[in-house]
Image: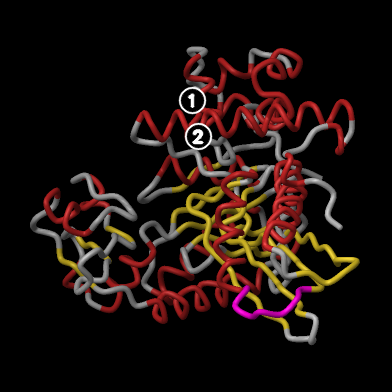
Amino acid sequence: MERAVIHLNVADFAVAVERVIDPRLCGRPVIIAPAGAARGAVYDMSQEAYLAGVRKKMPLQTALRRCREARVLSPHPERYTQAMRDLLKEALPYSPLIEPGENDGHLFMEATGTRRLFGPPIDLAWRLHRRVKTALGLTPIWSVAPNKLVAKVATRLVKPTGEYIVGAGEEASFLAPLPLYLLPGMEKADLMQLSALNLNRSHQVAALTTEQLQVPFGTRAGFIHDTVRGIDASPVRAFGKNPPRVMCAHTFDTDTHQSDILLDTLYALVERAGSALRNRRLAARRVGVFLDYTDGVQCIRSAAIRPASANDIMLFESARAAFTIARHRRVRIRHLQLVCDRLTFPPAQLFLFAEDRAIEQKRTALVTALDSVRNRFGTDAIRFARSRTPQ
């Protein structure tokens, strides 16, 4: 049976919701940002503002210099949460396998095997589009493709409005002429390394074998090989199923409060978590640290990772920040746990400044080299001095 995945995407979701509430916003540039904050950053923007040069997370003052006529609205997260619930309510009658985004207007629907009940997947996608438009006033982009990767790329191509259908067996030819930055999962370091080799399109990379890609990319060669060919076997997660996460933990033989031992142990956990993320081709957007004290008290703190990453060094920076906040008592610690969640495809946006690019390249090259050694000689073949075996 041919697989069919529907990807639904309400472009500029926050702006679209605000425009349903206030139709006077339609057709004019809109920026969603905390207007009163001195260092407010852009939360979302309309297509008109995007074309004027406004981008997400850009300082609001910079955004307004680029688009002076924009209407600035404060974010209303509760509205976006409710709109996402309403969107799911329209989709759930058609399939139990629906994987929504985090209040961003995205959802994947597994439509394989629904033909006898609801007709061909393309008809189902059209029906869902009409229901959302009629019931919610939102106009989603949609695509139908053999897997999630290709479906997501297809909706990116037709943004802000439209639809795209990719048939079974057409994945590689569909992706062939596209620039690599459109492919989900391609990291900044991948793009920079490929660009240095003068490889900027999918078909150029698809001409290389896995063995050839292993020379510059090591363990990521298989992922890149499959991605440029549109190969993606990841399932659509059932609605309500807990999102995936990576957990690592260590119980000390002797409870301790020595900072160097605790941080060394934390780094060892980060290395295990980072390796697991890279093997799953995912990146984490948040890291949590759980501390269990000797007296039974537990303290949990978390820190965001921006941008999402599976790099040990970036993971440790956020993990150490969470650990510092969590360790607020002068009591020995018995158990340390690290949780990486809000997993996503690694971002593909390139760094703007050369210094940032150089730092990222150095970090990625180091972690890639470590992975290569461990894959060949074993997990304990090489490690940082600080991640020596915890007590």
* Image coordinates for residue 237, horizontal then vertical, percent: 72, 61
Q: Quadrant of residue 227?
A: top right
- Which residue occupies 86% across, 58% down? 391
Task: Give the prevailing secondary structure in the magenta stretch.
Answer: loop
Q: Residue 333 versus residue 56: which sits nearer the camera? A: 333
The count of marks equals 2
Please state if 329 lies on the left or on the right of 116 as rendered: left
Disc 1, SS: helix
Q: Is 328 colored magenta in this rendering?
A: yes
* Image coordinates for residue 276, horizontal then vertical, percent: 76, 47
Q: Which residues are magenta?
A: 327-333
Q: Earlier in the sequence, mark 2 or mark 1?
A: 1
Query: Do residues under tags 2 and 1 come within 8 Å of each other at their CB atoms?
Result: yes
* Image coordinates for residue 163, horizontal then vertical, percent: 46, 47
**Mark 1 lies on residue:** 192
- Which residue occupies 61% across, 59% down? 319
Residue lying furthest left: 69
- Which residue occupies 8% across, 58% down? 69
